Image (cartoon, rainbow, N blue to C red):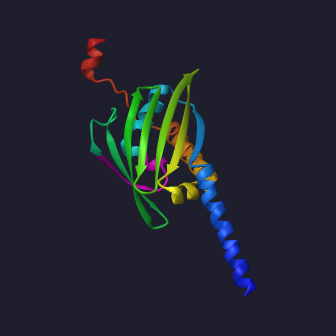
Amino acid sequence: MKFIKYLLIFLVVVALIFVGSGLLRPEQSYSSEITVNKPLKEAWAVMQDENKTTQWLKSITDVKHISGEKGTVGAVTEYTFNENGQESKVQETITSITPYEQVKMDFDMTDVMTMDFTIDFNEKDGKTTIKSSTIAKGSGIFMQSMLSFMGSSMQAQEDENMNNLKTLIEENTTDYFQVTEEEKELE
């Protein structure tokens, strides 16, 4: 009988710690920064290229434009992730965009979490620094508690994504700034 009593006390303490962590830390903040050996406009173009998204964001299997004009405030895109056979969808809404400087987005994973995401670009001496900042909040106390224990894995995932983006930009061979014959004649 003592064993059951101690087991119940142990389970209650673990549950209180779990719920308490979500109440004390309902949001997770993390950031990542890379510097690429490419000019700002090219780095921006690669990051904005929807056809290359799956090459730098881990586990994305599909990108689908939902509404609004792509690359403008209010545009909504749906991303499908497949992580260990588990499929999930996330909707991204652009909330602010200043070309070649910054993009702010809200991400919503229904009943799981929301994220405020900002990515900033800065060029110096022909190199571009790209910094991401994220604030993630669980939907409800259970998910807030889960996220409070996932901070380091979320940081590691963001670092991996940013390093993938760095590689993609530095190995880029797409000419996003081709000049047509008509434009050459006007010069």
One can see residue 175 in this view: no
Q: Is residue 34 above or below residue 10?
A: above
| Outermost residue to the left | 182
Q: Between residue 4 and residue 171, name the one nearer to us.
A: 4
Q: Position of residue 67 (x, y in %)?
A: 26, 42
Q: Position of residue 123 (x, y in %)?
A: 54, 23
**Left or right, residue 142 beside residue 14:** left
Residue 64 sits inside the magenta stretch: yes
Identify which residue is drawn at 26% across, 12% down.
186
Q: Is residue 163 above or below residue 23?
A: above
Q: Between residue 17 and residue 86, name the one nearer to us.
A: 17
Q: Give the range drawn in magenta.
A: 53-65
Q: Where is residue 47 in the image (x, y as percent from the top left)?
A: 44, 37
Identify which residue is drawn at 26% across, 22% down.
181
* Quadrant position of the N terminus in the picture: bottom right
Instruction: Classify residue 21 by image quadrant.
Output: bottom right
| Outermost residue to the bottom | 1
One can see residue 34 in this view: yes
Instruction: Classify residue 74 by image quadrant.
Output: top left
* Quadrant position of the C terminus in the picture: top left
Identify which residue is drawn at 32% across, 42% down.
76
Count of numbered labels shown in the rendering: 0
Identify which residue is drawn at 45% across, 67% down.
85
Q: Between residue 102 and residue 114, name the one nearer to us.
A: 114
Residue 24 sits inside the magenta stretch: no
Q: In this view, does 55 lie above or below 119?
A: below
| Outermost residue to the right | 2
Q: Where is residue 157 in the image (x, y as percent from the top left)?
A: 57, 51
